[in-house]
Structure formats: structure tokens, C-alpha cells
Image (tube, rainbow, N blue to C red):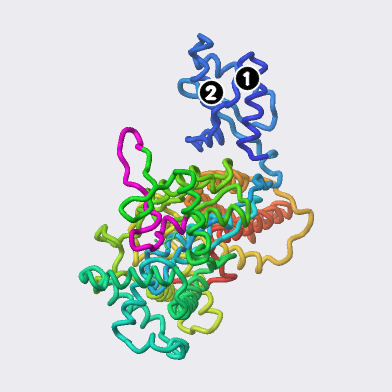
């Protein structure tokens, strides 16, 4: 039971005893930590019905709570806030974490596209998705992560059409196709040329459309070529995800729904949910608050299926493969309308069971200091590989040691990735944020490196003090120890909050707070100076608890903590 839940339970008992009927005692972490640990604001909300002053109600509550020795201090403050602090004795117990969820969840994240090199825009889905996935697993869910590769729409038709015009004999024999090969950089250049033409050249556009349609219908040469392009893209994407420690359970993509596309669309036509319109097949969208909405297009007049159709088919597929309780989509906020429409139609068509939750986990963009989407100095979109390299350079700059061996290289990589991820995850996920290329790898301020550094410092302290003697017991002898213990108890509360809101930033706040509290404790009360064996032992144990919690929390963010960290410039 968390501290909050324990206090809520005591409050409920007291309120019942006083004759109030109330389920939610409105308990929060105290907004005045210097006077209490938790507060309840229930007295204010009971006052009206009870026809009593809130202060009076609060005093009655406090009189009963005072009998409970688990609280060291109980008071009424302001207009009727009930404030409590836990006794040191109570806080000295081991913090507990109990799994609290037991769902089957499919999480769709990453979402890279064939032929396009990954750029900074692909960062957030991967990082946020990975953290949410790990958090849910830790809280008890069975979670299946799917990369949902973008590999079946018009972009592929564009590549084929571009190759038709650049290498005309490529499609003349099957063996030409079989021996076709391109690097990922070449493929992505090809794509750039194709997409420029697609915008300005109507004939080319038509060719790309026909190619997309033929590919989806099963043209054998196109399928072969497609597979070559896809494999190459997957290899390059995997390289990026490996570096980021982002691990998928499934590497499915839009193309895996191909056989289901016509099934889904026919089903919607049969049920009169979809209709023909100017050669296309669409689903008219019901008005929302009197506002007309554009229809959802499933099949274009040229015969090609759309992104929406592949998403609908994917929902049907996931329902039948996994019977999930929840499907999460960690995708840019700019696709909000797409998902609203797709979810509406999925429900209309009964492609998922009624009780399955479909959630778009939207996130904001990564901006440069000019407030516009983050670009390189020469004005191009920042590609992900370069961003990872930049992070490594910056991480290396802060290290005082010049002798870079394998171990230091690994450490630099861990700091770089940790900093890159933390800088992203610490923001409310729906906000845009400005990528700070200067300070993000420093071990000062609210950074990943600051937290990693706390772990490394504890490791080195524990190494120096040697083995911990039994019994492993906490004895709180100082307010700073109390604060650390209180924060340790709160891990599960923050974790639940992070889980419920699908919000890794809550965990970032928590870990930053715990690291700060550790730093204050350590500055004031070094372990080695302590003469009293019981206190010394307790303090060593406390540090090991902090270390475990920091490591666990970082792991849930997808961040590794280096065993040790070299001397730092900052
Ligand atoms: N490939 C898509 C894009 O780059 C993102 C895919 C998101 N997932 C989904 N099921 N639609 O925009």
C-alpha cells in the first residue's frame, strides 16, 4: 500500500466515524512539504452540505487522526486543510511496490517509413513508446510492441516510378531486379528526387499511383523490388533503434495487412458504413458539435488503399491475433484527426471488441532554438544518426579523462543516449520542446547525466565502504535521511501516475527529486565519518536503496546507468 493509499484509508475510517459519507477524501502530496507529507482537502467540500465551517470539520478529523501513532504530526492549516506527516518509525519500513495492472496491451510505436532515413521526428515516438512499454510491463501488463513499418503506401509507388524513369531496363527481366542493390543513403536520395517530382509533375504522379496500385495488387517484379528496398530500410532502422536501446517484439508493417484490406473495405460497404463516391470508397464522418468533417477515404479512385485503410485492417488483425485490452498509438499530435477517424470507423465496423480501448498517445514536436522544427546548421532536417553522433560528441566533451578506452567509450555512449532520452522525456509529452544542444549532456541541472552521476557516485561510495553488515535496517536519525526515505516510499505513487497518464515525465520528475535529495544527504552526512555502527549501517543500506530505485527508474525510461563515471568537467 502506498503512503497516499494508507492515508486515504485512515481518512475514510475517520470520516465514517464522524458520520460523513464520502468515498474520495481528496488526498494529495502536500504542497507545503516543510509542514507535512500529505494533505486532505475534504473539509472544504463537506462544509456546505454539513452546514459547518471547514475548520471545524477539519478539527474533528484531526482529533481522531491524532490517535494513530503512524502519524507524527497532524494539523489543521489555513481554511481547513488536514495535514499529516508520517512517523520516522513508519517511514523506516521497506518501501513496497505491488504490481497493480494485468492487461494485454499492444503498443504501436516507432513507425518509421521505408526509404526515408530516420530523422529527429522519429525520435519521440521511439523514446516515449519504449518508456511507456517498459513501465506497463513493470506494472504487471503483458505488452507487445510493434514497430508498424510504413511500407505500403504511395511513397513506395513513387520509388518504383522513379526507378522506372532512371533505370529503364531494370524492369525488363526478373534477374535485373534480383541483382538490384542500393545503400540506404542512395535509397533515400532516390526518394528525395521522387518526392520533388511527385509535387510538380502530374504525369509522374499518375505513374506513381499506378505503381502503388499494381504493387498492392501483386505485381511480382514490384513485390521483389519492394522487398529489397524494405529489407535495406529495416536494416538501417534497426541500427538506429539498437543504438537507442529501443526493442520491438514485432516488426510488422502496413504491408502485412494487404490481404485484409479488401475484406475490411467490403465489410464496411456491406454494413452500409462505407460508400462509393466518384470512384473512391469513403466513410462519411458524423458531424461533431455541429461541425462538418471530411470523409475518411479508404480506397482512392485509382484503386490504391490508403493509410487509413491499412490502420483499420491492422486493428482487425490485432484484435484477432492478440485480443488485447488496449491498443496504444504513440504518434505525433499532428495525426490526431487521422486517429479520431480511424477509431470511429473501427468501432462502427466492430473491428474490435467493445471494451478494447484505442488510444492515441500524442506528442509534440522537437524544435530548434528558433522555435521551428529542429534543423541542422545548413537548414536540413536533423537526421537521427547525426543527432546520436552529436550527443556522443557532447557527452565526450564533458569528460575530463583524455584516455578513451573501450569502457570509457561505452560510458560516453550511455551518457549520450541517456541525455538525449531524458531531455525528451522530461517534458510533458504533448508539449513541443526546444532541443538544447549545449547543456543536455551536462551532469548539472535536470539532465539524464545528473541522475546517472548520482548512481555512479553511490556505486563508488558502496565500493569504498565494503560489505554491508546485517541486519539490513533503516534507522532515521536526521531530517535528510527522512526526506530520502519519504521519496523512496513515493516511487510507486509516481509510477502509478506515470502509468495512468502515459506520461514518462512524471518519472523524470521523481528521479530528479530523488537524486537531489541524495546529493543533499551525502553532502551533509558522509557515510564514512559516522562512528555509530547502527547509523552507518543504516546509511549504507539507504544508499543502496536509492541506487536500486534510480537504476530501476532509469531503466523504465530506457536509460542505462553506467557502473562508474569518469571525472567530469561539469
Ligand atoms: N509511418 C507513419 C508516419 O510516419 C507513422 C505510423 C504510426 N502508426 C500507425 N499505426 N499509423 O507518419
Expressed as whole percent of the image width and height from the top left, the position of residue 28 reads 53, 34
- Quadrant containing ligand 1: bottom left
Q: Are marks 2 and 1 in contact (CB under 8 Å)?
A: yes
Expressed as whole percent of the image width and height from the top left, the position of residue 499 reads 55, 47
Classify mark 1 as within 8 Å of ligand 1 or not, answering yes or no.
Answer: no
Expressed as whole percent of the image width and height from the top left, the position of residue 77 reads 50, 24
Is residue 390 in view from this perspective?
no
Q: Residue furthest right?
A: 470
Instruction: Say the numbered circle drawn on residue 42.
Output: 2
Q: Which image quadrant is residue 528 in?
A: bottom right
Expressed as whole percent of the image width and height from the top left, the position of residue 515 reads 53, 55
* Quarter of the rendering occupied by the N terminus: top right
Q: Which image quadrant is residue 434 in?
A: bottom left
Is residue 94 in view from this perspective?
yes
Q: Tell me where the magenta segment starts and ends, as one range.
A: 287-311
Q: CA distance from mark 2 to mark 1?
A: 10 Å
* In the image, residue 291 lies in the stretch drawn in magenta: yes
Q: Residue furthest left?
A: 200
- Identify the residue at horizontal 59%, vertical 65% (top origin): 249
- Identify the residue at horizontal 71%, vertical 56% (top origin): 537
Residue under numbered circle 1: 15
Amino acid at each position: 500500500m502506498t503512503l497516499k493509499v494508507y492515508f486515504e484509508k485512515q481518512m475514510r475510517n475517520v470520516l465514517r466515524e464522524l458520520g460523513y459519507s464520502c468515498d474520495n477524501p481528496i488526498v494529495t502530496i502536500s504542497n507545503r512539504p516543510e509542514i507535512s507529507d500529505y494533505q486532505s482537502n475534504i473539509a472544504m467540500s463537506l462544509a456546505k452540505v454539513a452546514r459547518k465551517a471547514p475548520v471545524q470539520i477539519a478539527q474533528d478529523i484531526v482529533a481522531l487522526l491524532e490517535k494513530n501513532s503512524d502519524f507524527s504530526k497532524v494539523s489543521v492549516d489555513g481554511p481547513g486543510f488536514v495535514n499529516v506527516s508520517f512517523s520516522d518509525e513508519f517511514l523506516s519500513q521497506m518501501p513496497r511496490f505491488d504490481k497493480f495492472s494485468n492487461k494485454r496491451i499492444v503498443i504501436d510505436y516507432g513507425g518509421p517509413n521505408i526509404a526515408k532515413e530516420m530523422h529527429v521526428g522519429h525520435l519521440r515516438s521511439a523514446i516515449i513508446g519504449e518508456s511507456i512499454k517498459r513501465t506497463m510491463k513493470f506494472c504487471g501488463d503483458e505488452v507487445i510492441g510493434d514497430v508498424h513499418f510504413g511500407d505500403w503506401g504511395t511513397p513506395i509507388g513513387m520509388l518504383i516510378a522513379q526507378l522506372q524513369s532512371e533505370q529503364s531496363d531494370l524492369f525488363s527481366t526478373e534477374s535485373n531486379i534480383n541483382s538490384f542493390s542500393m545503400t540506404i543513403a542512395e535509397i533515400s536520395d532516390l526518394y528525395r528526387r521522387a518526392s520533388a517530382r511527385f509535387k510538380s509533375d502530374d504525369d509522374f504522379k499518375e505513374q506513381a499511383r499506378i505503381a502503388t496500385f499494381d504493387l498492392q495488387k501483386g505485381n511480382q517484379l514490384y513485390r521483389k523490388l519492394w522487398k529489397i528496398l524494405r529489407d535495406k530500410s529495416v536494416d538501417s532502422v534497426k541500427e538506429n533503434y539498437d543504438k537507442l536501446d529501443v526493442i520491438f517484439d514485432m516488426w510488422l508493417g502496413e504491408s502485412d495487412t494487404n490481404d485484409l484490406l479488401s475484406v475490411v473495405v467490403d465489410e464496411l460497404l456491406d454494413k452500409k458504413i462505407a460508400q462509393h463516391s466518384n470512384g473512391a470508397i469513403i466513410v462519411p464522418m458524423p458531424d461533431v458539435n455541429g461541425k462538418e468533417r471530411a470523409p475518411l477515404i479508404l480506397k482512392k479512385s485509382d484503386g490504391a488503399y490508403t493509410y487509413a485503410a491499412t490502420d483499420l485492417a491492422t486493428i482487425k488483425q490485432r484484435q484477432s491475433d492478440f485480443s488485447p485490452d488496449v491498443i496504444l498509438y504513440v504518434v505525433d499530435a499532428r495525426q490526431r484527426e487521422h486517429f479520431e477517424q480511424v477509431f470511429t470507423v473501427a468501432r462502427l465496423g466492430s473491428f474490435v471488441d467493445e471494451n478494447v480501448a484505442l488510444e492515441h498517445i500524442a506528442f509534440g514536436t522537437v524544435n530548434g532554438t528558433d522555435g521551428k522544427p529542429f534543423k541542422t546548421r545548413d537548414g536540413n532536417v536533423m537526421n537521427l544518426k547525426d543527432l546520436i553522433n552529436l550527443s556522443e560528441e557532447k557527452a565526450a566533451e564533458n569528460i575530463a579523462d583524455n584516455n578513451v578506452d573501450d569502457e570509457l567509450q561505452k560510458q560516453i555512449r550511455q551518457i549520450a543516449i541517456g541525455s538525449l532520452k531524458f531531455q525528451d522525456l522530461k517534458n510533458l509529452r504533448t508539449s513541443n520542446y526546444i532541443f538544447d544542444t549545449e547543456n543536455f549532456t551536462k551532469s548539472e541541472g535536470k539532465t539524464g547525466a545528473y541522475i546517472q552521476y548520482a548512481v555512479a557516485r553511490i556505486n563508488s561510495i558502496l565500493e569504498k565502504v565494503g560489505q554491508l553488515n546485517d541486519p539490513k535496517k533503516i534507522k532515521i536519525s536526521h531530517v535528510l535521511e527522512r526526506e530520502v526515505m519519504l521519496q523512496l516510499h513515493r516511487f510507486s505513487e509516481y509510477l502509478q501516475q506515470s502509468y495512468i497518464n502515459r506520461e514518462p515525465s512524471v518519472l523524470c520528475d521523481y528521479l530528479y527529486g530523488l537524486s537531489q535529495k541524495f546529493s543533499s544527504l551525502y553532502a551533509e552526512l558522509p557515510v564514512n565519518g559516522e562512528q555509530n555502527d547502527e547509523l552507518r549501517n543504516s546509511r549504507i543500506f539507504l544508499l543502496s536503496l536509492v541506487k536500486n530505485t534510480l537504476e530501476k527508474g532509469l531503466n523504465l525510461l530506457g536509460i542505462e546507468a553506467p557502473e562508474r563515471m569518469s571525472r567530469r568537467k561539469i
